[in-house]
């Protein structure tokens, strides 16, 4: 049997960290259900650990035993479901002809390119969101200054932004010459 079609039995550890406790427990169960729906995988068993407190967050994990059809689907499982560890139970050894190993490596590279593309897209979206949030905060400060909320304490109350962060925005607005500072008060220019 070609390794590409060979059934591979693995043990995988899936971990989740977050809060609240009930949320991560539910999410882990949903994650395992999603894996069970994957037509390339067959979950043979699962053992879910109770959530444990980790500082301000909670963590839980599950050990699942899965049968995967072929090395390509094993790579897909690892990339799609991101287990923290995988142990191959069966077979005890693999034999790869050059062609199969080349296909295996190309499948891996294709999956990595997909992950890279998603990461870059999310990075770009995150950058745009940060830029827009900064504009909204600056505009909020400008509107408050127009309504004579000129002291840092008043701006802190109105915006909910901590003093150190608010001062960063005020400094930027002063550098942009949109705001001037006089005697610990800020005014529109």
Image (tube, rainbow, N blue to C red):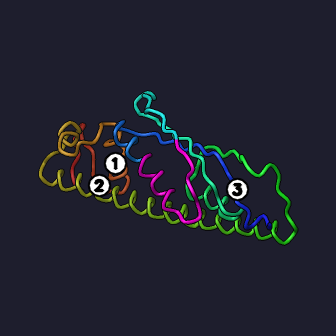
- Highlighted magenta segment, given as a residue range: 28-46
Residue 110 x/y as whole percent: 67, 69
Query: Horizontal placement of 109 versus 125: left or right?
Result: right
Residue shown at 80%/66% (left/top)? 1
Q: Are marks 2 and 1 in contact (CB under 8 Å)?
A: yes
User: Circle 2 — which element?
Assistant: helix
Q: Marks 2/1: CA distance? A: 7 Å
Task: Count neighbours of disc 2 (C-alpha within 10 A) and say few if under 14, some if 14 to 19, many if 20 or more.
Answer: some
Q: Nearer the viewer, residue 115 or 65?
A: 65
Name the residue located 44 percent from the left edge and 46 percent from the top edge: 28
The CA span between labels 3 and 1 is 56 Å
- Examine the image and state in which quarter residue 161 appears: top left
- Whichever of callouts 3 and 1 sits on the residue coming sooner in the sequence is 3
Numbered badge on residue 138: 2
Q: How many marks?
A: 3
- Any mark on residue 169, and which? 1
- Is 171 included in the stretch rendered in magenta? no
The label shown at residue 106 is none
Magenta stretch: residue 39 in it? yes
Where residue 38 sits: x, y (%)?
A: 52, 63
Q: What residue is rendered at 71% in x and 48% in y?
A: 88
Above or below residue 40? Residue 16 is: above
In this rendered view, identify the residue nearer to me: 122 or 141. 122
The residue singled out by tag 3 in the image is 8
Q: If you read the primary sequence from the N terminus, does the residue marked by circle 2 or circle 1 appear first?
A: 2
Mark 3 element type: strand
User: From the viewer's perspective, is 148 left or right of 188?
Assistant: left
């Amino acid at each position: 049997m070609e390794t590409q079609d060979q059934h591979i039995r693995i043990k995988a550890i899936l971990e989740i960290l977050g809060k609240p406790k009930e949320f991560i427990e539910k999410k882990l169960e949903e994650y395992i259900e999603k894996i069970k729906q994957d037509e390339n995988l067959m979950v043979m068993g699962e053992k879910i650990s109770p959530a444990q407190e980790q500082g301000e967050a909670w963590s839980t994990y599950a050990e699942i035993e899965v049968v995967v059809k072929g090395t390509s689907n094993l790579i897909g499982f690892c990339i799609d479901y991101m287990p923290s560890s995988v142990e191959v139970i069966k077979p005890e050894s693999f034999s790869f002809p050059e062609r199969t190993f080349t296909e295996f490596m190309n499948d891996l590279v294709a999956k990595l390119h997909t992950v890279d593309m998603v990461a870059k897209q999310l990075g770009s979206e995150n950058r745009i969101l940060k830029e827009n949030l900064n504009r909204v905060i600056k505009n909020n400060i400008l509107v408050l200054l127009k309504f004579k909320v000129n002291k840092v304490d008043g701006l802190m109350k109105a915006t909910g932004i901590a003093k150190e962060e608010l001062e960063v925005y005020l400094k930027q607005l002063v550098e942009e010459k949109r705001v001037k500072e006089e005697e610990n008060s800020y005014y529109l220019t």
